[in-house]
Amino acid sequence: MGNQLNWRALAGALAAITVTTIFGPATAGSADYAFELVETEVKQGDSATVAVRLFDKRTGGPVADAIIFATRLDMAPDGMEAMTTSVEAMPSDQPGLYRFKTNLMMPGGWQFSVAAKVQGEPDTIESKLVFKAVP
């Protein structure tokens, strides 16, 4: 009976290895990444800078070299979703930090919608981040 249990344990272990090998290692999903605002208050003006960090939730580490392909900045938090402004990508000196120049023409609540692709990740990472423009 002792030998039967050892063989069963070995068979179970081999089955687990086979399943892991066939399906490969688990990969990250878009839910494993997040954007966060660097500042929740940004000085109003025509040369305002909105900065966001993209990080891996599993490690807390920055995600560099993401391709930002969609941005939108509007006043949806204040009930004025039609009030939009331009967004221009700027260079960054830190991995995982993405900066954008914009014209925050009015003080109040603004929503920054951003979408990005991370190398090796099939899904798009999307966020809607709310901050306040202050005089």
Image (cartoon, rainbow, N blue to C red):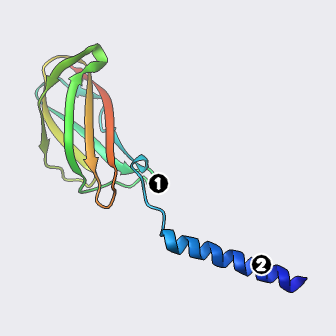
Residues 26 and 42: in front is 26
Q: Residue at x 27, y 19 (%)?
A: 76
**What residue is shown at x 13% (from left), y 31% (from top)?**
102
**Occupied quadrant, residue 115:** top left
Instruction: Work out whether residue 19 or residue 118 is closer to the camera in this orientation and state it.
Output: 19
Q: Earlier in the sequence, mark 1 or mark 2?
A: 2
The dot on residue 8 is 2
Q: Residue furthest bottom?
A: 3
Query: Callout 1, which amino acid?
Result: Arg
Amino acid, disc 2: Arg
Q: Position of residue 25 (x, y in %)?
A: 48, 67
Res. 89 visible in picture: yes
Residue 107: where, in percent of width, then height?
Answer: 20, 17
Decide if residue 63 is on the left or right side of residue 59: left
Q: Is residue 38 left or right of residue 3?
A: left
Q: Quadrant of the N terminus?
A: bottom right
